[in-house]
Amino acid sequence: MAQKNNIRSIRFSDELAELIDRQQGQTFTQKFENLITRCVWELPQREKQLQQIQERIRQEQERLFQLRKASEELRMLERDIQSARHYFGIVERRAKAISEKFEES
């Protein structure tokens, strides 16, 4: 274990004391060192993970937007097909009526 030559006296809040006390370690010094070490080594890694997760969320939001857009376009197409069927039915009935008039004459 490294020799500890740096002796310092610091003052801190009760809240910080509780945070330090929650860290792994048997003594206050071990807990304090573990807290600082985790912040220095793990925090940048966690921030990188957070950025990756945020990017995946952004991509999934874009994918969801595209799916919603495609779904709306499909609904519009379905309405257009139903409308076309309706008008083709009208055209068919008119054509049949015209055909029947010619057959009568």
Image (tube, grey):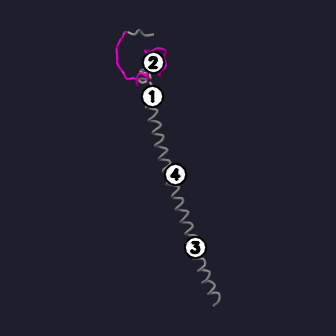
- 3 vs 1, front mark: 1
* Residue lying at 42% horizontally and 28% vertically, measured from the top left: 44
Mark 1 and mark 2: Cα distance apart in space: 21 Å
Say which amino acid is labelled 1: Gln
- Outermost residue, front side: 14
At mark 4, the secondary structure is helix
Say which amino acid is labelled 3: Phe
Mark 3 and mark 4: Cα distance apart in space: 31 Å
46 over 93 or under it: above or below: above
40 over 74 or under it: above or below: above
Determine contact: label 3, label 4, CB under 8 Å: no
- 3 vs 4, front mark: 4
Give the quadrant of the C terminus. bottom right
Location of residue 97 by image quarter: bottom right
State the residue position of label 1. Answer: 45
Q: Within the magenta stretch, is there residue 76? A: no
Disc with the residue nearer the chain's start (2 vs 3) = 2
Mark 1 and mark 4: Cα distance apart in space: 33 Å
At mark 3, the secondary structure is helix
Horizontal and vertical percent position of residue 69: 49, 54
Residue 88: assigned label: 3
Say which amino acid is labelled 2: Lys
Indicate left or right for 54 with 89 as reference: left
Disc with the residue nearer the chain's start (3 vs 4) = 4
Mark 2 and mark 3: Cα distance apart in space: 80 Å
Horizontal and vertical percent position of residue 14: 40, 23
Disc with the residue nearer the chain's start (3 vs 1) = 1
State the residue position of label 4. Answer: 67
Say which amino acid is labelled 4: Leu
State the residue position of label 2. Answer: 31
Give the magenta part as a residue range: 5-32
At mark 2, the secondary structure is helix
